[in-house]
Image (cartoon, rainbow, N blue to C red):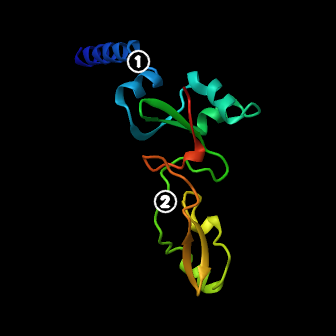
Amino acid sequence: MKAALLAALAFLILSAGTARAETPRQYCARVGTEDELRPLPSSLAPRVVHLFGLEHMPIAQVLRGTVIRCMGGAVLACNYGANLPCGKADTSAALPAGAEWCRQHPSADFIPAYISGHNSIYRWHCADGAPVAAGPVARIDARGFLTRYWKRLD
């Protein structure tokens, strides 16, 4: 009896929550700015397909590979692609992972992204056997995300 009552109560709570579910636009208007990356709701998939030129990508893949977040009350989307980071940018001007590369390539014109990371705002090279940051060469928004990967869905 107790289990049945708890199940009924849970159903009522869940039903009430879904009846008043906010759209992403309503949610972002309410919270303003939030850095949490959330899955793309299917209702926004057509807009993402158009904005990112994903007409030949299966919708299921668009949904799996796209996240949204709120900034200034607006909904922004990012579609992960090959080496396209949607998380916050790496703004560190230190690259410990590049030390070994630069020891082996003391005057290399570049440090490969698989070492520096695809989310670094710097272009890296080696000078006298040590990693050196040039730039910044990538812009970040006020919350620290790379602007070139995020598009406003409004």
**Which quadrant holds the N terminus?**
top left
Neighbourhood count class around disc 2 (C-alpha, 10 Å): few under 14, some 14–19, many 20 upward: some
Neighbourhood count class around disc 1 (C-alpha, 10 Å): few under 14, some 14–19, many 20 upward: few
Give the residue displayed 65% in from the left and 69% down from the top: 112
Give the residue displayed 41% in from the left and 19% down from the top: 22
Look at mark 1 in the image and give the residue it sits on: 21
Q: Position of residue 51 (x, y in %)?
A: 66, 32
Look at mark 2 in the image and give the residue it sits on: 90
Horizontal side of residue 32 vs 149, given as left or right: left
Residue 127 versus residue 101: which sits nearer the camera? 127
Query: As shown in the figure, which amino acid type bears the numbered disc 1?
Result: Ala
Horizontal side of residue 46 vs 132, given as left or right: right
**Which quadrant holds the C terminus?**
top right
SS at circle 2 = loop
Q: Position of residue 145 (x, y in %)?
A: 49, 48
Q: How many marks?
A: 2
SS at circle 1 = loop
Give the residue displayed 65% in from the left and 84% down from the top: 107
Q: Quadrant of residue 43?
A: top right
Image height of 5 relative to 68, above or below: above
Residue 82 versus residue 111: which sits nearer the camera? 111
Query: As shown in the figure, which amino acid type bears the numbered disc 2?
Result: Asp
Q: Residue furthest right?
A: 56
Labelled pair 1, 2 in contact (Cβ < 8 Å): no
Residue 9 versus residue 127: which sits nearer the camera? 127
